[in-house]
Image (spheres, rainbow, N blue to C red):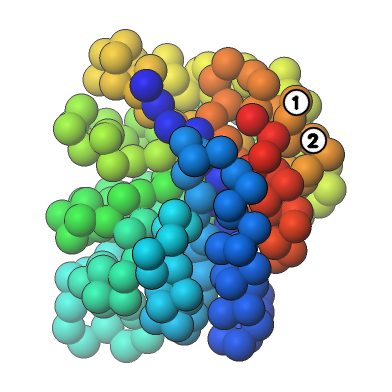
Amino acid sequence: MRKNIVAGNWKMNTTVPEGVQLAKEVVEKSKEVPAEVGLIVATPFTHLCPVAEVLKGTRVELSAQNCADKEKGAYTGEVSVGMLVSTGAKWTILGHSERRQYYGENDSKLVDKVQLALAAGLKVILCVGENLDEREAGKHFDVVKTQTENVLYHFTAEDMKNIVVAYEPVWAIGTGKTATAEQAQEIHACIRKVLAAKFGAQVADDTTILYGGSCKPSNAKELFAQPDIDGGLIGGAALKADDFIGIAMSF
Ligand code: 13P
């Protein structure tokens, strides 16, 4: 049985004290969320250690938002998977569209990053999603299929136990324009089919697939009611503990 998860991607928001405060509020309110729902916060690198302290012994798990594509060495400004693990992080987001769009993240780099993350014992939230031009040209299924195959087909069924996929249509991120539940569901079903083709129906069925893009308490229920939507990757609404927990209560 796959797990329902709500993950907050804080992106490049909050100072360290603000992030610590937000994490404390999330922990406090997490008591309201049914125990079977997984809760994750993905903080900036600078926040990982102090937020790990706040999350210690709680149900809320810690994630990074990226990692280096090299193990260690002379790569100024990069943060390795080993460093992430040493902070207490259990997860990293990889392949977010903002990284693909602004920082030249490509599928081959992502394969290296996923490999390193899994080898270090981190779980991965791999993001895929089409941009507005691709959707308007009717290429959204193809784009998502290719992005998924290009990265995940390098891995094994065993690896998939530690990988979550997040479908984030770029046109819905931070725009207030959510994909309809039907639009999201049909892509999620497509991703599951792509996984089934490589890993078999059982692995596909066991893989958590999150939706991300202007998800908020008011639309989460309808999205999460879809058979292939197993939770959310939340940006803006994750910066307010009430909204984040409100979303997590929407299953
Ligand atoms: P928003 O929820 O702000 O649209 O961001 C979604 C996202 O990119 C999460 O990774």
Image position of 155 (left or right of 45): left
Image position of 238 (left or right of 1): right
Please, what is the three-letter code of the amino acid marked with disc 2? Asn
Q: CA distance from mark 1 to mark 2?
A: 6 Å
Please, what is the three-letter code of the amino acid marked with disc 1? Glu
Tell me if residue 227 comes above or below residue 213 in the rendering: above
Which residue is at a point 43% across and 32% down the rendered structure image? 3
Q: Are marks 1 and 2 in contact (CB under 8 Å)?
A: yes
Q: Position of residue 87 (x, y in %)?
A: 31, 76
Which residue is at a point 64% across and 68% down the rendered structure image? 25
Decide which of 70, 122 is in the foreground and name it.
122
Q: Which quadrant of the view contains residue 18?
A: bottom right
Q: Position of residue 32 (x, y in %)?
A: 64, 47
- The residue at which mark 1 appears reads as 222
Q: Could one spot residue 205 in this view of the protein?
A: yes
Q: Position of residue 248 (x, y in %)?
A: 63, 43
Checking the image for residue 219, the label placed there is 2
Tell me if residue 76 comes above or below residue 248 in the rendering: below
Decide which of 185, 171 is in the foreground and name it.
185
Q: Position of residue 165 (x, y in %)?
A: 44, 38
